[in-house]
Amino acid sequence: MIVMPFLEENHGRKSRKKIMFEKEDLIRIANETMPFGKYKGMRLIDLPEPYLLWFSNKGFPNGRLGEQMALTLAIKTEGLEGLVKPLKQPLT
């Protein structure tokens, strides 16, 4: 289990939050793709930060996808994408 501090902004208010995840979650966000919308087929780690911020304000999808999108946003806002991108596997 890995715990990462994360600064979350919600409706103009900032708060510190901790996100807990497993190393397998990093592999998933490096390789799983967005299943719908404008960025359908794009890997979660490659989604634009403004798109993830929009979901953060409106509400992430329920379930694992929403959790992975929230983790992706935390990784991007903390500048840690470089840890995840080497985990990418070739798309099939």
Image (cartoon, helix red, strand yellow):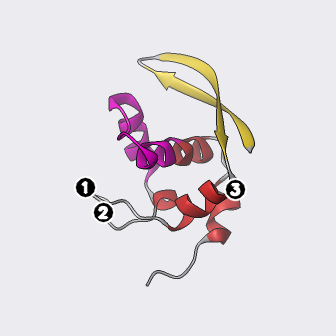
Residues in magenta?
Answer: 48-70
The amino acid type of the residue labelled 3 equals Lys
The stretch drawn in magenta includes residue 71: no
Per the image, label 2 sits on a secondary structure element best described as: loop
Q: In this view, does 17 lie above or below 42?
A: above
The stretch drawn in magenta includes residue 55: yes
Looking at the image, which residue is at 39% across and 65% down?
A: 42
Q: In this view, does 83 lie above or below 22?
A: below
Q: Mark 2 points at which residue?
A: 40
Q: Earlier in the sequence, mark 1 or mark 3?
A: 3
- In this rendered view, identify the residue nearer to me: 25 or 83: 25
Looking at the image, which residue is at 70% across and 59% down?
A: 83
Q: In which quarter of the image is the N terminus?
A: top right
Q: In which quarter of the image is residue 92?
A: bottom left
Per the image, label 3 sits on a secondary structure element best described as: helix
Q: In which quarter of the image is residue 15?
A: top right
Callout 1 environment at 10 Å: few (<14), some (14 to 19), or many (20+)?
few
Q: In which quarter of the image is residue 82?
A: bottom right
Q: How far apart are marks 1 and 3 (CA)?
A: 27 Å
Q: Do the residues labelled 1 and 2 touch (CB within 8 Å)?
A: yes
The amino acid type of the residue labelled 2 equals Lys
Q: Name the residue under label 1.
A: 37
The image's mark for residue 23 is: 3
Looking at the image, which residue is at 56% across and 44% down?
A: 71
Question: Where does residue 39 sit, x and y in percent of width and height?
Answer: 32, 60
